């Protein structure tokens, strides 16, 4: 089936799920999102780009930013990250504190909040301007030079950052934080507040579908680094639902509480979906269902 028709079909299939789930409300600015919205975009490695529904509408990328900050740290050739962050699924909610005490301030993986804070901390040390570099990188890879930071979301999250502050201070108490906690949180909430559409995200995600090669054809990550990021997306990208996601969808994916999910079919395409209604683990209800239909209809799972 032609890709555009396939995406229209998926949009019809998930229609009954529009409005399902709960919009994230722990960041007040996100609570205003319309749960009925849904978009899907596919960017193929051969250059084709297709979309359906609200695929051009910008939304808050939130935790999907963690994929790109990890890519940037690894692209700097800095493997020391793995001394301070693990690579195992946590089986816990994305903002959980419990494992940090048992595991001496070493977060389970770079996609739970604690791990992402360590990645951002490391990126600040490596580049001096984590969010400035991230924004420039995403603007180039998405071919959208106007990608903004949504200041209202950033300010709102910063004012409700007690849990992330606690995680960062806890890691600092174990010597696992190099920069002042307030600086790391400032950068982290700004990276999460970058607004991207499904179209933008699918284009930027091609980096991982192309095994680490950028839009301009230059190498950014080695093939092995790209494989490793995809592997961590598969095992940890949807938190305590990563097993279910692998079972139903079967490709690497990273969700955000804005309702977006970026998924990768290595060697073929990047797929981005968005619908703000979340399940109790913080993953988009209609978004996961759409990706389930996508891999079923195309046969493009990694298994
Ligand atoms: O740290 C937070 O609370 C958010 N800025 C990002 C969390 C998030 O997107 C988790 N994903 N499902």
Image (tube, rainbow, N blue to C red):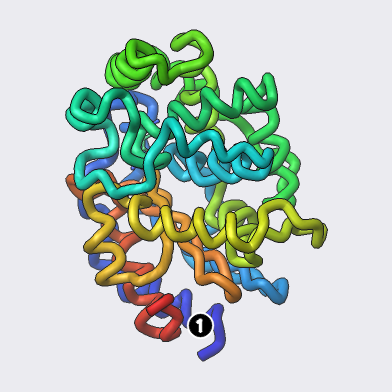
- For label 1, the SS is helix
Residue furthest to the bottom = 1
Q: Which corner quadrant holds the C terminus?
A: bottom left
* 62 vs 232: above or below: above
Report if residue 250 is visible in the image: yes
Q: Position of residue 13 (x, y in %)?
A: 31, 75
* 222 vs 240: above or below: below
Q: Is residue 22 left or right of residue 205?
A: left
Residue at 70 percent of width and 41 percent of height = 137
Q: Position of residue 159 (x, y in %)?
A: 37, 12
Q: Report the front residue among 233 and 271.
A: 233
Q: Position of residue 156 (x, y in %)?
A: 40, 19
Residue at 80 percent of width and 62 percent of height = 217
Whether the residue carrying mark 1 lies under 8 Å from ligand 1 is answered with: no
Residue at 22 percent of width and 63 percent of height = 244
Q: Report the front residue among 105 and 285.
A: 105
Q: Is residue 30 left or right of residue 20?
A: right
Query: How many residues crowd around disc 1 within 10 Å: few (fewer than 14), some, or many (20 or more)?
Result: few
* 286 vs 82: above or below: below
Q: Report the front residue among 85 and 25.
A: 85
Residue at 24 percent of width and 61 percent of height = 243
Q: Is residue 28 left or right of residue 270?
A: left
Q: Is residue 108 left or right of residue 260?
A: left
Q: Position of residue 197 (x, y in %)?
A: 55, 50
Hey, which quadrant is residue 72 in on the image? Answer: top right
Q: Count numbered badges in the picture.
A: 1
**Regarding ligand 1, which quadrant of the image does it lie in?**
top left
| Residue marked by disc 1 | 5
Report if residue 60 is visible in the image: no
């Amino acid at each position: 089936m032609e890709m555009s028709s396939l995406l229209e079909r998926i949009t019809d299939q998930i229609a009954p799920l529009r409005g399902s789930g709960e919009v994230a409300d722990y960041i007040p600015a996100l609570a205003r999102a319309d749960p009925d919205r849904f978009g899907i975009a596919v960017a193929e490695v051969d250059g084709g780009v297709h979309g359906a529904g609200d695929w051009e509408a910008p939304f808050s990328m939130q935790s999907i930013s963690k994929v790109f900050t990890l890519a940037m740290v690894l692209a700097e050739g800095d493997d020391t990250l793995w001394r301070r962050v693990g690579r195992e699924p946590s089986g816990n909610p994305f903002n959980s504190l419990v494992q940090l005490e048992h595991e001496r301030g070493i977060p389970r993986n770079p996609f739970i909040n604690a791990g992402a804070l360590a990645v951002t901390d490391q990126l600040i040390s490596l580049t001096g301007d984590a969010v400035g570099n991230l924004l420039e990188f995403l603007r180039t890879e998405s071919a959208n030079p106007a990608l903004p930071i949504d200041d209202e979301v950033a300010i709102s999250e910063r004012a409700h950052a007690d849990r992330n502050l606690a995680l960062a201070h806890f890691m600092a108490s174990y010597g696992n934080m190099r920069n002042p906690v307030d600086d790391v949180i400032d950068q982290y909430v700004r990276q999460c507040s970058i607004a991207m559409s499904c179209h933008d995200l699918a284009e930027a995600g091609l980096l991982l579908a192309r095994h680490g090669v950028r839009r301009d054809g230059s190498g950014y990550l080695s093939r092995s680094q790209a494989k490793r990021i995809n592997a961590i997306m598969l095992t940890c990208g949807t938190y305590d639902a990563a097993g279910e996601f692998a079972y139903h969808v079967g490709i690497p994916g990273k969700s955000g509480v804005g309702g977006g999910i970026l998924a990768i079919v290595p060697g073929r395409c990047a797929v981005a979906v968005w619908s703000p209604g979340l399940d109790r683990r913080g993953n988009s209800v209609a978004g996961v269902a759409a990706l389930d239909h996508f891999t079923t209809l195309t046969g493009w799972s990694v298994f």
